[in-house]
Structure formats: C-alpha cells, structure tokens
Amino acid sequence: MTFSEVIGQDEVKQRLVQMVSDDRLPHAIMLCGPTGVGKKALAVAFGCYLLAHKPKAAAAPPPEHAGLFGFDEAPAATEHTEHPVGPDMADVPEPPMLRNLQHPDLHFTFPTIKLPSMGTTHKPVSDDFAREWHDLLIQGPYFSIDQWLSAIGAENQQAIITAGESDDLLRKLSLKSSQGGRKVSIVWLPERMNIECANKLLKLIEEPPSQTVFLLVCEEPDKLLETIRSRVQRIDVKRLSAETICQALIERRGISDEAAQRLSRLAGGSWQRALEELQVGTENEQFLDLYIMLMRLAYRRNVHDLKAWSENLATFGREKQRRFLSYFLRMTRESFAYNFQQPDLCYMTQAEEDFARNFARFINEANVISIYELANRAMRDIGQNANAKIVFFDLALQMIVLLLQK
C-alpha cells in the first residue's frame, strides 16, 4: 500500500517521510484523530514505506540482492539517497508482499474476542483472526471497530487487546528481521488494551527491539496509560475537508458532482462515513426507516405498534442498538436545524431531508433538549446491559408526550 491510496492528509504524509529523510525517525509514533480520517491508512502506508526503504545504516546491499523485494527498478538506499517528499512520495514500485500486506516484518495488533472454541486458558491474540483481518484490510483500510466486530461475528461482545497479545508481539519482535531491515508493529486502537497488556507494551516501547518501529493508531488517547503517551511521538490527524472528500468521491467512485457535494458535507470529515453512505442498503437506511416509524407511531399514539417496534429493536446486538441511538440523536439534531432554513447547518441525505421537510416542525425549542436527554439515558442504559425491550418501549412512550410539546 502506498500513500497515494490515502485520501488527503498530505501534511501528515510529508511529515512522516521527512522524518525518514532527516534520519530522525522515532521508534514509536501515535496517530490520533476521529474515526474515518485515515489514521489506519496512514499507518499501513507508512509501514510499507519503511519496509521498502532500508535504514541508512543497513543500506547498499550486494548486487546479487537487488531483487530481494521482488523488483529491480528502485535503487538501494545509500547514505546520500534522500527519500522523496511530497503528496506522491510513495508512488514507487512496491514489493508484491507489501502490496498484498503479507510482509513478514509487518505485524498487526488489534482488538479480539474469545471464541467458544478457544480453551479456557487461551488468551486471544491477533493471529487467531489473521485471515479475517487481512481480508478486511485488503478491501481497504477505512473501516471502523463496528465493521471489524461484524467481520468476526462479535457484535455482542467487547473486543480488547489481551496480555497474550503483548507476549506474542514480544516473541515476534525479538526475532531478527527476515529482510535485514526494519520491523514495523502497527497497533490499532491501543486504548482497548487491558492493563496487563498495556504495561507489557510500555516495557516494549521503553526498550524496543533493534530496528523496530511502533505505529499506534488511536481514537481515544486519554484512555491510554500516561506513561505510554509520554513515550510516543503524537501526530494529530485532522478531519478531511469537504472539498477533499468531494474530489475523491468524483475521481475514485465516479459519482456526480451534486451527489458528491451532498455526501462530502454529510461525511463530516470522514472518508469512511462517505463510503458507508455510498453503499446500497446501508445500515443508516434501516435506521432512517426505524426513526420514521417511531415518529409516526408516536404521533398517532399507537401504543400497540410501538411495543412491536421496541421488540424489534431489542433483537439487535448491543452495539447496533447504540449505533441506532447515535443515529436517533443525529436525525433529531438535523431536524431541529432544518427549521432555520439554513442549508449550511444541515447534513442529511436526500431521503432524510425529504422526511425532515414535513417532520422538522415537531422538533423545536420546547422539546429538543428533552429528546436529547431521553436518547442519552437510553444509550447509557443499553451500555449497562439493561433490558432492551423496556428501554426502547420507554423511549417510544415518552416520544408520544414530547412530540406534542410546542
């Protein structure tokens, strides 16, 4: 994978490669930022870049090793070779095993779950899910923790990084590089490490194996140990501009200018969100139908069907229930903003806007805060494993009263 496959983020790309060019590469870097802005994509592209360029001290291999990585076009790095810096800095021939993300010195660590088939003493590690990870990653590095959980059939479980993972990582990184260069360890969502794993990773970062570079991809850095945060070089990855997303949608997905502009605003700076909105039959379409049904049934005071609605929601996994409540909050906010007739304030799909056109007047100053508080309480209760039927039926019944407030 090369940097040209990463949407935008040219400033971060240049900064990363400049570190290599200036021979000032830290042994641990943490990329922080919101979901979907390209942190994981940057880490994978940079990891491939590091493995395709040997460290200066290990440069100039004998001529017979010229084809070591499967290509002869790129000259071996020497003391006087500078790495290109710029938006297309990584558009150089890539070894096949890097293109396929199967390089033996590229290691991935990510949250896992314990399967029923695992023994009672087994601590799940990333290698247990290597095939699922590779299949998802090779489709594209823009995916969320929810998509990962769905890929491994764990929507109702909390995925973590166990102490067994840090032990396995120590074993791998203690081995000599198979290609005579660097070893790259990419840790996705390190904030999901349990305390035992976090302490062992801290030890690894404090005393890193030779020629090892750690790339941490973090969304909630405040949940990490302060001692880990203080030992890595943090790089904040900002949200993408609407213009960048719009251009990428047109060039890479071939959609019309008008559709791209609407989607780019709706994406909120996240390429991942833009991709989700492009998919046919997305989860958000299902959530919109459920939102519309709730509001119409509540307006009609149809308690019988509201009970059936809540029972339907209760069949979803906990994570999906929380995603619906997040969608509920977003649609409530957008409906309220629609009343101001300021297009720049609204971020909705065409289908959402079509519904809001007639519905928005029911979300007003008298009830919007109460509706927000209601949904947030429901999200808290779901997170605490409350009975989902009761939680959603209570929400539905209270919406009957709240929609009447003007």
Image (cartoon, rainbow, N blue to C red):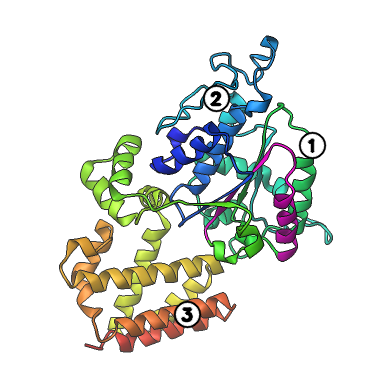
Q: Is residue 402 above or below residue 97?
A: below
The residue mark sitting in front, 3 or 2, is 2
In this view, which residue lies farthest toward the left? 341
Q: Which amino acid, mark 1? A: Leu
Mark 3 neighbour density, 10 Å: few (under 14) some (14–19) many (20 or more): many
Q: Identify the residue at image location x=63%, y=61%.
A: 192
* Residue 218 belongs to the span the image colors magenta: yes
Q: Nearer the viewer, residue 31 or 242?
A: 31
The residue mark sitting in front, 3 or 1, is 1
Note whether residue 292 is visible. no
Q: Nearer the viewer, residue 314 or 21?
A: 21
Segment tinted magenta in the rendering: 195-219
Q: Is residue 17 left or right of residue 396?
A: right
Q: Secondary structure at mark 1?
A: loop
Q: Identify the residue at image location x=46%, y=56%.
A: 35
Q: Which amino acid, mark 3? A: Ala
Mark 2 neighbour density, 10 Å: few (under 14) some (14–19) many (20 or more): many
Q: Identify the residue at image location x=78%, y=56%.
A: 118
Q: Earlier in the sequence, mark 2 or mark 1?
A: 2
Q: Is residue 64 above or below residue 38?
A: above
Q: Which amino acid, mark 2? A: Glu
Between the C-alphas of marks 3 and 1, the distance is 49 Å
Q: Which residue in the structure is indicated by mark 2?
A: 94
Q: Earlier in the sequence, mark 3 or mark 2?
A: 2
Q: Which mark is residue 175?
A: 1
Do the numbered discs 3 and 2 sit on residues whose CB atoms are within 8 Å?
no
Between the C-alphas of marks 3 and 2, the distance is 49 Å
* Residue 344 belongs to the span the image colors magenta: no
